[in-house]
Structures are given as structure tokens and as C-alpha cells.
Image (tube, helix red, strand yellow):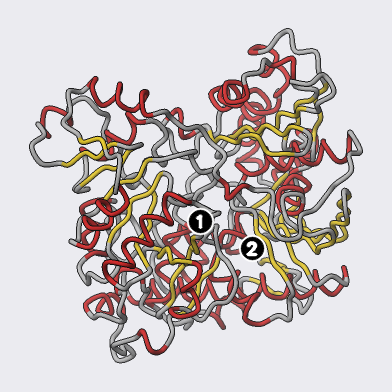
Amino acid sequence: MNKNDINILGISCYYHDASAAHLSNGEIISAFQEERFTRIKFDPNFPINSINSCMDFADININEFNCVAFYENPNYKLERLLQSYKNNSLLNIFQNTKKIKNWIKDKYNFLEEFYSYFPNFNGDVYFVNHHLSHASAAFFPSNFEDSAILTIDGVGEDNCTTIGHGLNNQIKILEEQKYPNSIGLVYSTFTSFLGFKVLSGEYKLMGLAPYGEPKFYKLIKENLLEISENGEININLDYFDFNSNKKMYTHKLSELLKIKPVKENDQITVDHMNIASSIQKVTDEFVLKNAKYSLKITESKNLCMSGGVALNCVANQKILNKINIKNIWIQPASGDAGNSLGAAFFAYYKKYQQRRIVNKNKDFQKFSLLGNEYTNDQIEDTINLYNLKYDKLTTNKYNIISELLSKKNIIGLFNGRMEFGPRALGNRSIIGDPRDPNMQNKMNLKIKFRESFRPFAPIVLEEFTEDWFNFSGKSPYMLFTAFLNENKKINSINNYKGFDKLKFIPSKVPAVTHVDFSARIQTVSKDSNFNLYSILYNFYKITGCPILINTSFNVRGEPIVCSPKDALACFFQTDIDYLFIGDFLLSRKNQNIESIKKEFKKFDLD
């Protein structure tokens, strides 16, 4: 590397979804999530594997980094923890003191752990406030010179929501909403109340919401929280206990709703669906009001977003539908993983005062394909290690894959660089035919081992998006929902309630259409992902349908696959029909499945 290069290593860890990112002269070189290597979902621990992968990918050592940027300020975080326990009863003093001591021991001393791995590092260490990391991850990779910036999450240090303004190479935070007034924590509370796991089950709550009606919305607004016209939220803490390790709500919430909290293996009822619908409506309202207010006070026509709530694609679509906005860009890794990227960007522009040059036609996220990749030789060595039968595809490989898809086969895809963020965007994906009315149930129950009500996302050829969906523009990161066009619907299900809606075919692509005719779309072009585009285009030529199912290559409870070994493990422990890995095609047929399964770890479902 050139001695004048500015290399920055961004690190996020200790809360959830640890990660590391490498920035060189303002360009994203690589970014990794620790869970992909350790196979522990949302692994919060110091991301040594991710850091080493950043160095391996660029072939540099730790002392070629000018600076290490950490995603939050531990001093501010400790202040918030102390304050949140300050007024607790005497009975809880010992327990809370123990919690704080453990937090200081395990999470506070980032420097000690970093230097234990890299004792000879001679660069700078730079601490960036949590929501500044989110804001930087949202604004600096975007293609906007000027933008309002909205960050919404559970809590970082003491902030839960911030509004900022990005202009060229600078970000200024204009307004803040502080703990405990957090829509993210409210959403997670209802995730917990409905029996889903906090920090991973929020997607399930969002997927459950369309089965119900917002019948609890008024009750929630009259008792639990208030949202001003400017989007400021005030929470009634009588119903919440955010400091609890076991749950995030008090007994009063159950009494108010007149419903018991859902326990594992409890049957989900229509009332539970209505609760999900209601809290989604509250969240939509909060996000919409804050987006409007952000644009107002910054006098900008552009909006950037990050933070865990920015992954709520239903709320994001409300912004597009209901606000006069010119452009919107959302960080694909909007959770804490993306903050390694944000911290590195903030250090580059703030500490080193570098000029920012914007390409108005293209963002700098590189379609979030920022992870590692494997050569055909490496893949073939792994396949041969397990004595598997395979074919090497040279010519017509996209025709072969598309033909298999058209015959209702389900295929695992493992090609190119791994995605950064929670969405599989075609390089670590499972794909299938969306026209098959049985495909959603089959993939949920026999491939993903997850709840049957959860919808799948469609990938659509960019040039056909408006033919099928009420959506204009591009959506390469799968961060918006869109409604199916009327001429693609073949049934109305308004007369059915709850999960009975699953029994009926609502569209020409039933496997990717939710019960309200919405879909979380990913648009695909040659530029965004040539391999995926080629498969999809050939499928279109065969079937006349420019859409495929795309879901992440993993099972419930497992991180997205990272290595060829991970791909093989997932392939042989599910009912995926074929694995297209590098240039190799493996079929489940004629393999010694039971013997192979013993070679791989089985994941516990979350």
C-alpha cells in the first residue's frame, strides 16, 4: 500500500452483532460480521475474526492502519447505565451493582482487549458516539452531498433517536431523543411479549402484523406512549422494564391488553396478530413524523437513515408513499454491525478532514457485497474433502440453473463476496420459483425450519419492477415493501381471518406475496449482481416470470453461511434440492446424506 494512504479500521462490538470494516482513502475495502465466522448468531464479542479477515482481504498488517475507530463512547454508555439504575429500589441495588461491575469488566475496556491482540499497534484509537456512527454509516456511503439524517434504534449510550444534517464531509446532530423514550425498545418489548426473541424476532413481529388489524392502536396510544407532531415520543414506564434480563414489560401491560404474554410453543391467536398490527402502526407513525420533521428542520429534499428501526421496510415504504421526498438512502447494515463502517467514515472525514467527492448516480456501498470470497480451487477442495458427487458447470450454467428452478427445484447459491448486513442479496441465498403456491410453506417448514406465516422476499429484474409492483426506482438492498399491481392479483382474501389467509393464493407469484399483497422487493441489475441477474434473466426467458424467491442461505437460529463448509452443512441438513457453489453443482440425489449430516453441527432454532 502507498505510504500516503489513509487506512482506518472500524470496530463495533460488545452489545450485539459485532463487526469490523476497512476504509482506505474513503473507499470501503471490506466489512465483516463476527457471527459469520463463529456461527453464533449476532455474536457480540470482540471481532477478532472479522479484523483478521479485513487484514487478509487487503493483505495488510495492523500497523498499516492509521487509526482504529470504535463505534461508541464507553464513558457516555456507563453514565446512562448508572442513571438508569439510580432510582431502583433497595432490593435491586445488589443485583444492579453486580450488572454494572460485569459490564465494566466485560465491555467497558475496549482498549485492553484490542491491545491484548495487537500489542504493537502504533496508530491512533478514535472513539465515535453511537448515533454519530449510525449517522455516518447512513450519510457518507450515500450519493447525496446534502441530506437530513434520521437514526432510530433501541438505545446507544443515552440516545434512541437523532436527527442530523449531512453536508459534504460534515455531520451535525440537531436534535436527540434520549433513553428511555425509545420506539425501538417499545417494538422489542412487544416482540418479547408475543414470544419472539429480542434482537432477532422483530422481523417476525413485522411479518405477523398484516394478518391482524390495529385494534389495540388506540389503547396503546392512550396508555403506553405519546408521539408529538414533531415525532417526539414519551413513554409511560409503568408498563415497561427495560432493565430486566428476563422481559421488557411489567405485569401492567398484560393487564391492559387483557392477554397473557406468549410463551414458547403457545399458539398464536388473532389477538396476537392484532397486537402486532397495532404496534407496527404506532411505529409507522413515529418513523413518518420523524422523517417529515427531519426534512423540515434541515430544509433538505434528501433523507438518509440508519439504526435498527431503519430495517423496518414497512415503515420505510410509508415515507416513500406519504412524504414529498426527492431521494432516500438507507444503510443496508443499519443495526450495530453497520456502525463499524460508520465509525471508520466519521474518523476519515472528521479526524483527517478529507474532502468528500460524491457520485450522484451511484452510492459507495458496493451493493453491500463487502465480505470474503472463495476461488473455485478452494471450493473444490472442500467438496472433495467430503467425497461428494458434483458437476462442474462451464458453459450454459445459467440456463441449467434456471431450468432447474422452473421445475420447482430449490437451489442454494454461494458465489462471489459475502453480503454485509442482515439481508442475503444473491451471493449467500436460497432461491426458488415464486409461482408455486406450495413453495412458501415448503421453504418455511422444510428448508428454513421457521414459522409458516413468515413471508419470502422477491427478487425482480429491475426493468420489470413497475410491471409487477407499485414501486418506481431501485431497491437493491431489500429495504422497502411494495404492493403488487392489481393485474397480478388473482384472489381477494378480505373475508378470511388470521392464518386462514395462508390457505388461499393471492397472486400470480403467491410464494413472495404477503397476505396484504405486499412484498419486500429487491431489484436486480447487471451492475448490482451479474451472477444473480443472469440466473433471473434466463428464468424469465423460460417462464415469462421476471421474479424469483430470495431468502438467506441459513436455517432459523443460524447466521448466513460464510464458507463453503457452512454452505455444505446447511445444504445437507435441509431439503434444498441443489447447491450452486462457485462453478459447481451438487444434487442431493445419489449422495450419502445420513453419513454426511454427521459431519456438520446442527443449529438450535431460536
In terms of depth relative to the viewer, which is nearer, 605 or 4?
Answer: 4
Distance from the alpha carbon under mark 2 to that under mark 1: 38 Å
Q: Is residue 22 left or right of residue 415?
A: right
Q: Residue at x 27, y 50 (%)?
A: 411
Q: Relative to 161, say whether 170 is above or below.
A: above
Mark number displayed over residue 212: none
Q: Residue furthest right?
A: 353
- Closer mark to the observer between disc 2 and disc 1: 1
Please state the horizontal and vertical placement of residue 342, each as a whole percent of the image.
Answer: 72, 43
Q: Which residue is mark 1?
A: 526
Please state the horizontal and vertical placement of residue 135, each as a whole percent of the image.
Answer: 76, 52
Please state the horizontal and vertical placement of residue 389, each as a whole percent of the image.
Answer: 16, 31
Q: Relative to 294, say whether 500 is above or below.
A: below
Q: Secondary structure at mark 1?
A: loop
Residue type (three-letter) at the residue carrying disc 2: Ile
Q: Relative to 396, say whether 344 is above or below.
A: above
Residue type (three-letter) at the residue carrying disc 1: Lys
**In the rendered image, which quarter contains the N terminus?**
top right
Mark number displayed over residue 183: 2
Instruction: Residue 307: name its quadrant.
Output: bottom right
Please state the horizontal and vertical placement of residue 300, each as a whole percent of the image.
Answer: 84, 70
Q: Residue at x 71, y 74 (%)?
A: 227
Q: Is residue 602 left or right of residue 172?
A: left
Crowding at dot 1, Cα within 10 Å, few <14 / some 14-19 / many 20+, comes out as few
